[in-house]
């Protein structure tokens, strides 16, 4: 990613058609994952001839987010062979819901993670700097999680690595931009310590799942504190327009990262109920990860799709829905209120297509402006 200034739109070059196809595939996977989320929340949905409900987490993390992150990396690097991982992630997600043996989808997604790890290793060899190393660790975490999942280890073993994939990828990207602030040696060491604590917890989890989750949770909490205090968003939130919007998304996400880390630290891998487990995961995957997506999408999507994004204050609407609904959902989870859990979850799901509709609307608007 590159730093963003307060500007009305971002100009880009028209990409090849197959990049649109990969993005369309990623969006299809996202819709399947959201449908599965509604079923898992308990809402009565029309029956589909596809085994979606049991694959929600894998579709969202390894399918949609794995494909999106891999595609963004491929576009940024410009290496043609780097487009193999997002294609494999998309095909693997389709295989999961097509009725094929589970090993087919899991195998393809594991190959996608291996491909992204190779891409990241090649990039690290060319640019041996800290933020690239952190993102490479994120890709490796995705691979480890998928290998455990393919080997039919308990899902919670894979989940800690999947969370590491997303968290370390985002932290590495933010660390890159943080260089503008010229952090001191003690600040850089504290970042490494937080990453090390998380990785220690992930590595401990195969030996003691309970202890591993708690230590990893401490690492997530420390990373959230570090990012909230040291990210450039703490300063850019004082600006206006798109720059402020991005900063608000980031800072809100860091609050949820700290909350999720605290829940992991407090409850461990065996919470007292499924609702608590829901709070532990979705405070991170919705509150943190999707807040980052909402904030970074106006930067990422123009480069992926060759369309400019015209900022509008209405972007705050889905962000507000996402976080307000998540507060309701987590409150329901913590107090055992299934009604709050279901309604909060419903509006969490609705916030995502609402954001996509607004984003696509601005892309179409910029196209009409460029043609007029």
Image (spheres, grey):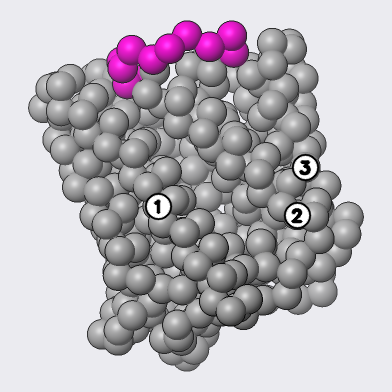
331 vs 353, left or right, is left
254 vs 14, left or right, is left
* Image point (26%, 85%), residue name: 238
* Image point (63%, 25%), residue name: 149
- The residue closer to the viewer here, 167 or 217, is 167
Q: Look at the numbered disc 3 and give the secondary structure of its residue.
A: helix
Q: Disc 1 versus disc 2: distance between alpha carbons? A: 21 Å
Residue carrying label 1:
355
Vertically, is 44 above or below 314? Answer: above
Q: Residues within 10 Å of mark 1 (few under 14, many from 20)?
A: many
- The residue closer to the viewer here, 126 or 7, is 7
- The residue closer to the viewer here, 203 or 235, is 235
Vertically, is 220 above or below 13? Answer: above
Residue carrying label 3:
87
What's the mark number on residue 19? 2
Q: Which residues are magenta?
A: 40-50
Badge count: 3
Q: Disc 3 versus disc 1: distance between alpha carbons? A: 24 Å
Q: Look at the numbered disc 2 and give the secondary structure of its residue.
A: helix
- The residue closer to the viewer here, 102 or 176, is 102
Query: Which of the two discs, 3 and 2, labels the residue nearer the N terminus?
Result: 2
119 vs 330, left or right, is right
* Image point (30%, 84%), residue name: 240
Q: Look at the numbered disc 1 and give the secondary structure of its residue.
A: helix
Quadrant holding the N terminus: bottom right
Q: Does the magenta stretch mainly form a helix, a strand or a loop? A: loop
Whether residue 186 can be seen here: no
């Amino acid at each position: 990613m590159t730093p963003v200034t307060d500007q009305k739109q971002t100009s880009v070059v028209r990409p090849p058609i197959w990049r649109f196809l990969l993005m369309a595939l990623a969006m299809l996977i996202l819709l399947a994952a959201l449908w599965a989320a509604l079923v898992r929340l308990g809402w009565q949905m029309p029956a589909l001839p596809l085994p979606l409900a049991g694959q929600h987490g894998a579709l969202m993390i390894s399918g949609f987010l794995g494909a999106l992150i891999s595609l963004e990396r491929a576009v940024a690097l410009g290496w043609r062979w780097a487009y193999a991982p997002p294609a494999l992630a998309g095909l693997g997600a389709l295989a999961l819901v097509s009725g094929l043996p589970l090993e087919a989808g899991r195998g393809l997604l594991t190959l996608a993670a291996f491909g992204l790890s190779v891409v990241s290793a090649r990039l690290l060899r060319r640019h041996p700097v800290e933020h690239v190393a952190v993102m490479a660790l994120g890709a490796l975490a995705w691979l480890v999680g998928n290998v455990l999942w393919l080997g039919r280890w308990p899902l919670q073993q894979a989940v800690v690595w999947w969370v590491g994939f997303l968290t370390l990828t985002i932290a590495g990207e933010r660390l890159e931009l943080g260089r503008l602030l010229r952090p001191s040696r003690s600040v850089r060491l504290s970042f490494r310590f937080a990453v090390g604590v998380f990785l220690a917890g992930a590595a401990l989890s195969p030996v003691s799942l309970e202890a591993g989750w708690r230590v990893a949770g401490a690492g997530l909490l420390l990373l959230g504190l570090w990012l909230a205090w040291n990210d450039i968003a703490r300063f850019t939130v004082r600006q206006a327009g798109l720059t402020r919007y991005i900063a608000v998304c980031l800072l809100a996400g860091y609050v949820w990262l700290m909350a999720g880390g605290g829940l992991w630290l407090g409850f461990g891998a065996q919470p007292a109920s499924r609702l608590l487990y829901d709070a532990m995961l979705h405070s991170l995957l919705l509150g943190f990860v999707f807040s980052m997506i909402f904030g970074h999408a106006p930067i990422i999507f123009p480069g992926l799709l060759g369309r400019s994004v015209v900022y509008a204050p209405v972007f705050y609407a889905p962000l507000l829905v996402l976080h307000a609904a998540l507060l309701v959902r987590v409150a329901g989870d913590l107090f055992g209120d299934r009604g709050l859990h279901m309604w909060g979850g419903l509006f969490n799901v609705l916030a995502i297509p609402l954001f996509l509709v607004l984003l696509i609307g601005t892309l179409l608007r910029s196209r009409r402006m460029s043609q007029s």
